[in-house]
């Protein structure tokens, strides 16, 4: 690799999107067992917003947890990937000086896998965090063919992956989404759509075998929609207190899922994409210079697809 300096987004204090800066920093070199990835694109996730607002963890801090790109170099002991290979992955939620919103990143074994061949890298970057979260949550639910699955927050990143993966696993999917997202979630494979704004007037009781909650609000209400034998999980931190409480309440208990990097699971996502079962849903693609705008969009909490940072896109010219 000839470059010694690269662009990376960093911030020096907790705060709003305005603390994010695109800086020149030293490009990393891969150590033993590490892979140097030239990042083509990274996505913005709600956890990036939490990290940016948090005083806990050192500074300067980077942003971005998932990416797609190609291998630039490998360290000693890596013999299953070669320079030029198309890869993608999830770095985990740990706080680090440089994240995925950078020209290059260092990945370890569990943080990298072959990227899907059937979609562009800029599209693929939308999927690792949300796809792994949905996959690991659905696995916890032990879905059986024909199970009735309720997905709350179905138009968001995790929800849109859960609708598609749930369907691929043989479930009949009912999506809870906002009014403007009905067509989107039907198109992803939901058999039925319930509007979260009016759920109380038309929610069926004890009708579902499985629940994945990707919003965290009103989770006790959604739990009542589970059969007594039903299984539920939430991935949203807002839902964690009720999930713990549900263990001592009569009725189905709600589990908590926290996504972990996994090469096997990332490879499974690659197969789901290449088999046509999973596709990314992208709202907007931004150049690196517009990272503040991407964070502003994600922190509204109203997603109609992912916000992706394209590292090779040029900023719009000012005229
Ligand atoms: N535990 C983990 O490891 C893990 C991993 C990834 C994400 N998460 C968490 O999971 C949550 C979802 O992440 P994400 O990436 O999918 O977020 P996202 O893309 O921002 O999606 C949020 C979704 O919530 C929906 N929503 C808003 N208000 C709602 C309401 N009152 N009832 C039901 N749905 C509502 C939004 O729909 P509208 O746009 O129609 O309002 C949107 O589809 C976040 O809290 C995130 O931090 C946790």
Image (tube, grey):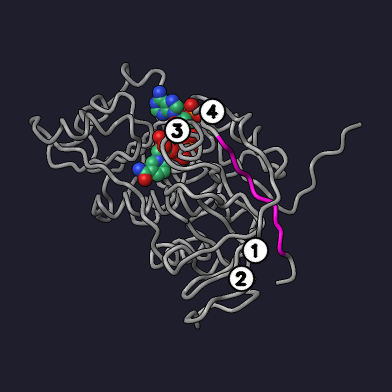
**Decide: marks 2, 3 in contact (CB < 8 A)?**
no
Marked residue nearer the N-terminal end (2 or 4): 4
> How far separated are the C-alphas under marks 1 and 3?
28 Å
In reply to whether residue 250 is colored magenta, the answer given is no
Mark 2 or 3: in front is 3
Above or below 162: residue 155: above
Mark 1 or 3: in front is 3
> Which segment is the magenta one?
4-12
**Which element is circle 1 on?**
strand
> How far separated are the C-alphas under marks 2 and 1?
6 Å
Looking at the rendered structure, which numbered label has been put on residue 38? 1
Looking at the rendered structure, which numbered label has been put on residue 15? 4
> How far separated are the C-alphas under marks 2 and 3?
32 Å
Marked residue nearer the N-terminal end (1 or 3): 1
* Res 268 quadrant in image: bottom left
**Decide: marks 2, 4 in contact (CB < 8 A)?**
no
Residue drawn at the location 49% of the way across and 79% of the way down: 78
Circle 2 sits on which residue?
71
Q: Is residue 239 left or right of residue 17?
A: left
Marked residue nearer the N-terminal end (1 or 4): 4
- The quarter of the rendered structure image containing the N terminus is bottom right
Q: Is residue 45 left or right of residue 139?
A: right
Marked residue nearer the N-terminal end (2 or 1): 1
Q: Is residue 235 left or right of residue 130?
A: left
């Amino acid at each position: 690799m000839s470059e010694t300096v690269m662009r990376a987004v960093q911030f020096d204090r907790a705060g709003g999107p305005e603390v994010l800066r695109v800086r020149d920093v030293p490009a990393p070199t891969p150590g033993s067992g590490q892979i140097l990835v030239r990042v083509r694109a990274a996505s913005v996730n709600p956890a990036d917003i939490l990290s940016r607002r948090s005083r806990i963890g050192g500074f300067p801090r980077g942003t971005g947890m998932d990416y797609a790109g190609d291998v630039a170099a490998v360290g000693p002991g890596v013999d299953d990937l070669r320079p030029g290979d198309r890869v993608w992955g999830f770095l985990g939620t740990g706080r680090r000086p440089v994240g995925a919103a950078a020209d290059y990143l260092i990945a370890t074994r569990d943080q990298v896998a072959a990227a899907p061949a059937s979609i562009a890298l800029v599209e693929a970057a939308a999927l690792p965090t949300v796809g792994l979260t949905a996959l690991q949550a659905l696995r916890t639910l032990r879905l059986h063919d024909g199970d009735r699955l309720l997905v709350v927050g179905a138009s968001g990143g995790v929800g849109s992956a859960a609708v598609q993966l749930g369907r691929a696993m043989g479930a009949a999917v009912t999506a809870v989404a906002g009014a403007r997202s009905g067509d989107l979630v039907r198109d992803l494979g939901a058999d039925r759509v319930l509007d979260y704004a009016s759920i109380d007037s038309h929610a069926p009781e004890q009708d579902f075998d499985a629940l994945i909650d990707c919003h965290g609000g009103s989770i006790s209400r959604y739990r009542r929609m589970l059969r007594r034998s039903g299984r539920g999980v939430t991935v949203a931190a807002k839902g964690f207190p009720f999930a713990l409480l549900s263990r001592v309440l009569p009725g189905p208990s709600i589990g908590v899922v926290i996504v972990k990097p996994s090469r096997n699971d990332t490879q499974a996502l690659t197969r789901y994409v290449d088999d046509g079962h999973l596709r990314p849903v992208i709202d907007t693609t931004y150049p690196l210079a517009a990272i503040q705008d991407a964070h502003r969009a994600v922190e509204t909490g109203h997603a109609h697809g992912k916000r992706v940072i394209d590292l090779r896109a040029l900023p719009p010219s000012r005229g």
